[in-house]
């Protein structure tokens, strides 16, 4: 998002670097940037950095807690530590309007915030690594909350950086790279982290120490995003917006950023119904995903069994599903694509009901994980296309996108917090049938919005 003083015509120019006034001889940063092909690959690496922390306060943490003997109901409640992902739109205007002392002056508006957020993220992951789920669940929750807060702040900056950096001709490639790298980052912090913990255990470390060092390694991997931010150049749109707003007070910039974004969105027809649909579309994924890792451990699979399948065939299914989602979204209308994505991601939960009946079977686990990853990736790509279509005003892209992704996280955070109690009361086979049924409200909203002409009003969507 750029400052309100810049005109839409100015913002539409998506130049990717500030014109150079230096000598032609490249320095180390410029040479490395050329090697990375700058724009798209930089966005790809930032996507990895954004996807990495999510599981560290989510599914990976839940495996750690389950192995430590924490009750299923308590594990389900830990979905609430994702609250910052649902509230990040509240401080997105601060990220747009305020400077980070020293960081902004040295690195620029977007890169300064990005480096600052990543520094805090590394510290938060290290603090979480020092906790013990068996002895101090409160401090585990506090550490996970800090990780989620710093991670969601990084997401705000990366989204704005991506939109402002890429010209029209590279937006599709940039989004595809970002989504793929985001999913790979999540896989590294789930399956990769579990393998690393097992590796530390194999050296003779006790389990609590192995988990601690596993999280330390994950904190070190955040440096991939830090190096990328150092290599990148500040988006020219951001530099122009900073110059345009230089004479305004910080408070005035914050008010313009917040009020303009929300009032413009809420003035649209059926805005509230569209926001409810954003909340519910991925709820079926979130409700089952909260308990997938504890379910696999409870069923009798080892941590390494789960990690190997998620890391191997699960990753392949995710990437293929991403391509399939892109094909569906390009081949069919947005409404038809959402219907397809919404139905298949819901039905995939039945594969886990079948797995619960089959028991410990590697092939059945591989099929269930592949079905979930493949259909979830299809739904995610189509859903991201829809969210991007909703952000039509370049003056408010960052804050509006933060609002929409925050609402999308409501299902994962609040609505899913009771999943552990539901699983405990119903048993695993019936629980995953319920996960299919929770998709019905979103499909009803989808039908209503389609009948109202909501999707036609958004115009063509580029994927």
Image (cartoon, grey):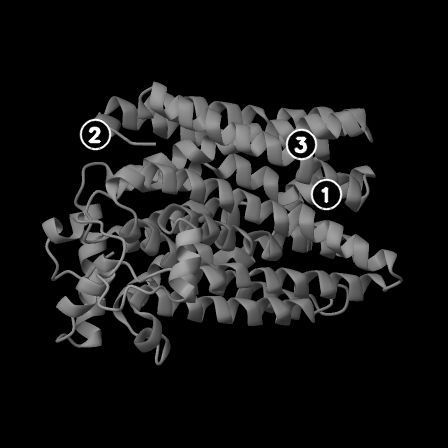
- Residue 152 in percent (x, y) is at 45, 58
Image marks 3 and 1: residues in contact by CB distance under 8 Å: no
Q: Name the residue under label 3.
A: 313
For the residues labelled 3 and 1, the Cα–Cα distance comes to: 10 Å
Residue lying farthest to the front in this orientation: 25
Please indicate whether residue 362 sits to the left or right of residue 368 in the image: right
Q: Mark 3 falls on what kind of element? A: helix
Q: Which of disc 2 and disc 1 is earlier in sequence?
A: 1
Q: Which of disc 1 and disc 3 is earlier in sequence?
A: 1
Q: Name the residue under label 1.
A: 307
> Which quadrant, please, contains the C terminus?
top left
Crowdedness near tag 1: few (<14), some (14–19) or many (≥20) residues, C-alpha within 10 Å: many
Please indicate whether residue 458 sits to the left or right of residue 444 in the image: left
Crowdedness near tag 2: few (<14), some (14–19) or many (≥20) residues, C-alpha within 10 Å: few
Image marks 1 and 2: residues in contact by CB distance under 8 Å: no
**Image disc number at residue 65:** none
Q: Mark 1 falls on what kind of element? A: helix
For the residues labelled 1 and 2, the Cα–Cα distance comes to: 41 Å
Crowdedness near tag 3: few (<14), some (14–19) or many (≥20) residues, C-alpha within 10 Å: some
- Residue 250 in percent (x, y) is at 22, 75
User: Residue shown at 28%/31% (left/top)?
Assistant: 461
Q: Mark 2 falls on what kind of element? A: loop
User: Toward the viewer: 355 or 425?
Assistant: 355
For the residues labelled 2 and 3, the Cα–Cα distance comes to: 36 Å
**Image disc number at residue 459:** 2
User: Toward the viewer: 228 or 343?
Assistant: 228
Q: Is residue 132 above or below residue 286?
A: below
Judged by depth in the image, the label closer to the viewer, 2 or 3, is 3
Task: Name the image quarter holding residue 253.
Answer: bottom left
> Which quadrant, please, contains the N terminus?
bottom left
């Amino acid at each position: 998002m750029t400052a309100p003083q810049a005109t839409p015509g100015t913002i539409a120019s998506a130049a990717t670097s500030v014109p150079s006034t230096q000598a032609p001889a490249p320095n180390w940063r410029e040479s490395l940037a050329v090697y990375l092909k700058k724009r798209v690959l930089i966005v790809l690496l930032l996507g990895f950095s954004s996807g990495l922390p999510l599981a560290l306060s989510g599914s990976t943490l839940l495996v750690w807690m389950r192995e430590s003997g924490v009750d299923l109901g308590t594990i389900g409640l830990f979905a609430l530590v994702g609250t910052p992902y649902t509230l990040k739109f509240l401080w997105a205007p601060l990220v747009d309007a305020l400077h980070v002392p020293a960081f902004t002056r040295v690195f620029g508006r977007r890169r300064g915030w990005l480096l600052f957020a990543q520094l805090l993220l590394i510290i938060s992951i290290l603090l979480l690594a020092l906790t013990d789920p068996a002895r101090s669940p409160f401090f585990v929750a506090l550490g996970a909350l800090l990780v989620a807060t710093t991670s969601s702040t990084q997401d705000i900056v990366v989204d704005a950086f991506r939109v402002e950096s890429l010209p029209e001709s590279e937006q599709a490639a940039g989004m595809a790279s970002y989504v793929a790298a985001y999913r790979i980052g999540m896989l590294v912090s789930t399956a990769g982290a579990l393998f690393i913990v097992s590796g530390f255990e194999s050296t003779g470390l006790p389990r609590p120490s192995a988990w601690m060092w596993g999280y330390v390694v994950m904190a070190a991997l955040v440096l991939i995003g830090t190096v990328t931010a150092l290599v990148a150049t500040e988006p020219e749109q951001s530099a122009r917006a900073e110059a345009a707003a230089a004479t305004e007070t910080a408070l005035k910039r914050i008010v313009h950023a917040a009020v303009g974004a929300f009032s413009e969105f809420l003035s649209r027809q059926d805005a509230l119904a569209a926001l409810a649909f954003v909340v519910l579309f991925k709820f079926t994924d979130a409700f089952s995903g909260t308990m997938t890792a504890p379910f696999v451990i409870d069923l009798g699979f080892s941590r390494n069994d789960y990690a190997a399948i998620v890391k191997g065939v699960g990753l392949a299914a995710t990437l293929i599903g991403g391509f399939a989602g892109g094909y569906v979204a390009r081949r069919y209308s947005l409404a038809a694509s959402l219907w397809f994505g919404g139905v298949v991601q819901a039905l995939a939960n039945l594969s886990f009901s079948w797995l619960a009946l089959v028991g410990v079977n590697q092939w059945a686990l591989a099929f269930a994980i592949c079905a979930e990853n493949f259909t979830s990736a299809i739904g995610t790509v189509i859903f991201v296309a829809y969210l991007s279509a909703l952000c039509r005003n370049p003056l408010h892209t960052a804050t509006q996108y933060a609002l929409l992704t925050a609402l999308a996280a409501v299902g994962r955070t609040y609505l899913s917090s009771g999943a552990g109690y539901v699983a405990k009361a119903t048993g695993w086979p019936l629980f995953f049938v319920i996960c299919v049924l929770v998709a019905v409200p979103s499909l009803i909203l989808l039908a209503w919005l389609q009948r109202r002409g909501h999707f036609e009003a958004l115009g063509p969507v580029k994927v």
